[in-house]
């Protein structure tokens, strides 16, 4: 099969910042120290009221073009991963094509996926290039979960931040994309969900109801059953990592760095210990940006590369809403 690489990578964060001190003013029963000790996040970026996922994706792409001297005319496919599109229709990727002056001969599509979205996007982009359909794929991730969160939902407000990433996937680059392990289990759909707004439940629901854990649930906003998501992660990610290794014919000892979806530090610490991974081979980057959903892995790859920690074989793994999970190995060249 034709070799496919990540050729360039950049990201964008909104200007507005929500610090732990800001949160404590809304939830005085907590302290800033308690928030950071619980989730490992000091601050998160919040998109402006008039800023969309499409806007953020365009900003990430422009950063990519500038930083890596990329000509938009060389791009022949645009893929956008988002669960907060600008419109139900048209496709946000089509709008982005025009805004970035990418040729009209380029294909463009959105796909709706969350924390595993970057891995799935790499799989789609690799397939397009390996199949001879495209040569240079612009893979974008952009998410605005903060616009789905109820102001009283302190749990989710501490975790999620907005952001976008842009990657150029091509036949040459700095990271060769390996074989994929992907999976889906829709029975977990209700554990991370925005129930209203789509065609299943178009109308608003009551403002507050109680969930099965005697916690307040806001059905018109983002709901996350933290305990069930935690259980899912601990059950699913270790077998995922083993399958990634098997499909790429590597042993655990061959991996130089693990970059997992940056959900929260407590979960990542638990996962690392459960899988007996050396701390020096496990990367964290969420304290200053929060959980940016589909953008956490590309942001972490970018920062690890900047810190000269991206070398050898890097295992990446995404997991979450859907339920959905996926991973691969990047061989750094």
Image (cartoon, helix red, strand yellow):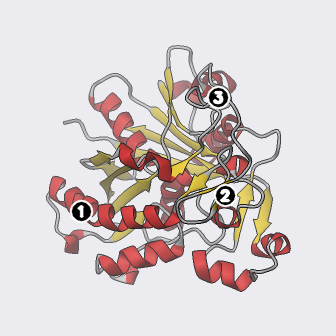
In the figure, residue 140 lies in which quadrant? top right
Q: Residue at x 78, y 57 (%)?
A: 151
Q: Position of residue 90 (x, y in %)?
A: 62, 19
Q: Point out the tag, 2 or 3, that comes first from the N-terminus.
A: 2
Q: Is residue 205 above or below residue 303?
A: above
* Vertical arrangement, residue 79 with respect to residue 157, above or below: above
Check if mark 3's residue and mark 1's residue have beta carbons within 8 Å. no
Do residues under tags 2 and 3 come within 8 Å of each other at their CB atoms? no
| In-image side of 42 versus 313 (left or right) | right
Q: Which residue is labeled 2 in the image?
A: 161
Q: Residue at x 37, y 46 (%)?
A: 187
Q: Give the alpha-carbon distance from disc 2 to disc 3, as whole Å.
A: 26 Å
Density class for disc 3 (Cα within 10 Å; few <14, some 14-19, many ≥20) is few
The residue to which callout 3 is attached is 202
Q: Viewer-proximal residue, 80 or 270?
A: 270
Label 1: few (<14), some (14–19) or many (≥20) C-alpha neighbours in 10 Å: few
Which numbered marker is on residue 239?
A: 1
The quadrant of the image that shows the N terminus is: top left
Report the residue at 32% width, 50% height from top: 176
Between residue 85 and residue 3, name the one nearer to us: 85
- Judged by depth in the image, the label closer to the viewer, 3 or 1, is 3
As measured in the structure, the alpha-carbon distance from the residue carrying label 2 to the one carrying label 1 is: 28 Å
Q: Is residue 148 left or right of residue 223?
A: right
Residue at x 30%, y 24% (from the top left corner): 132
Q: CA distance from mark 3 to mark 1?
A: 37 Å
């Amino acid at each position: 099969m034709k070799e496919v690489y990540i050729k360039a990578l950049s990201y964008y964060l909104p200007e507005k910042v929500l610090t732990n001190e800001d949160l404590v003013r809304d939830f005085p029963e907590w302290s800033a120290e308690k928030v950071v000790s619980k989730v490992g996040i000091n601050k998160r970026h919040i998109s402006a009221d008039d800023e969309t996922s499409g806007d953020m994706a365009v900003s990430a792409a422009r950063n990519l073009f500038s930083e890596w001297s990329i000509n938009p005319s060389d791009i022949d496919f645009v893929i956008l991963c988002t669960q907060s599109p600008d419109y139900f229709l048209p496709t946000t990727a089509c709008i982005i094509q025009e805004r970035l002056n990418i040729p009209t001969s380029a294909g463009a599509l959105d796909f709706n996926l969350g924390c595993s979205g970057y891995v799935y996007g790499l799989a789609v982009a690799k397939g397009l290039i390996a199949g001879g359909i495209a040569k240079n794929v612009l893979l974008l991730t952009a998410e605005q979960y903060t616009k789905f969160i109820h102001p009283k939902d302190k749990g989710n407000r501490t975790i999620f931040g907005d952001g976008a990433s842009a990657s150029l996937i091509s036949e040459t680059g700095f990271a060769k994309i390996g074989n994929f392990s992907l999976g889906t289990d829709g029975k977990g759909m209700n554990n991370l969900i925005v129930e209203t707004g789509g065609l299943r439940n178009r109308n608003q629901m009551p403002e507050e109801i109680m969930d099965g854990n005697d916690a307040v649930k806001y059905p018109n906003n983002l709901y996350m059953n933290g305990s069930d998501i935690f259980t899912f992660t601990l059950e699913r990610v270790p077998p995922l990592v083993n399958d990634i290794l098997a499909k790429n014919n590597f042993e655990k000892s061959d991996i130089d760095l693990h970059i997992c979806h940056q959900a929260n530090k407590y979960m990542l610490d638990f996962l690392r210990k459960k899988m007996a991974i050396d701390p020096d081979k496990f990367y964290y980057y969420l304290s200053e940006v929060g959980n940016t959903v589909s953008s956490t892995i590309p942001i972490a790859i970018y920062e690890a590369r900047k810190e000269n920690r991206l070398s050898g074989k890097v295992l990446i793994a995404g997991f979450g809403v859907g339920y959905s999970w996926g991973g691969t190995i990047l061989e750094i060249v």
